[in-house]
Amino acid sequence: MGIEALYRRPRTTKPEPGHRIYPYLLRGMEITRPNQVWAMDISYIPMARGFVYLAVVLDWASRRVLSWRLSITMEAAFCVETLEDALSRHGKPEIFNTDQGSQFTGSAFTGALASNGIAISMDGKGAWRDNVFVERLWRSIKYEEVYLRAYETVGEARSSIGQYLDFYNGRRPHSSLDDRTPDQAYFDLPPLRAAA
């Protein structure tokens, strides 16, 4: 009958039979500049009572979060909205990488990429390392923000995560970016030096 229990589920990648899976295009590629490759993923965010899903679009070269959304469901629409927001505010990448989740293999999502002339890349099945920079972002968000809080409402989660992502983009230096923030790396600005 298709009846199943509703409970917290961290698994966010579920392939949809019949959806096209695209090859992974980034193996061996040197990614050196902003808007060369963007990546997107969804993560499970626990709250005091319940949970939400967080989707982000990330620029690989600069590690900058270009767009993000929270949703109470994993419908493809919130992923398409996040993608369209990133495209409208930041132009378009040459390649867009995701996992093989049904939100990313459906025609609404792949159609938005194809209509903008963006090459589609997908991680190998179970190959989390193929999207390692988004996985590192999830670790930072969860250990520096989410696990320190118990959000009471979706609005509170949205506000607090938004503040953290502003901090992550604008004030948190990365050693892999020569101690620049993602904003500095994305906009090609030098790192700020501490006053003597």
Image (cartoon, rainbow, N blue to C red):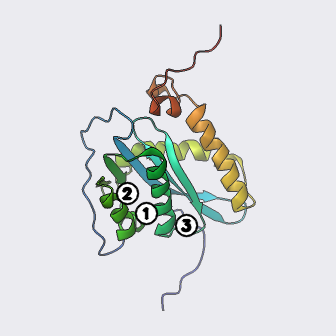
The residue labelled by disc 1 is: 13
Quarter holding the C terminus is top right
Vertical comparison of 134 with 83: above or below: above
Identified at 33% across, 56% down, the residue is 116
Disc 3 versus disc 1: nearer the observer: 1
- Would residue 16 be seen by someone viewing this image from the given angle? yes
Residue 185 position, x and y percent, is 46, 30
Q: Determine whether label 3 and label 2 are within 8 Å by CB.
A: no
The residue labelled by disc 2 is: 99
- Tell me which label, 1 or 2, sits earlier in the chain: 1
Position of residue 64 in the picture relative to residue 24 (left or right): right
The residue positioned farthest toward the bottom in the image shown: 1
Compare residues 30 and 118 and report the one nearer the observer. Answer: 118
The residue labelled by disc 3 is: 9
Q: Determine whether label 1 and label 2 are within 8 Å by CB.
A: yes
Residue 130 position, x and y percent, is 34, 48
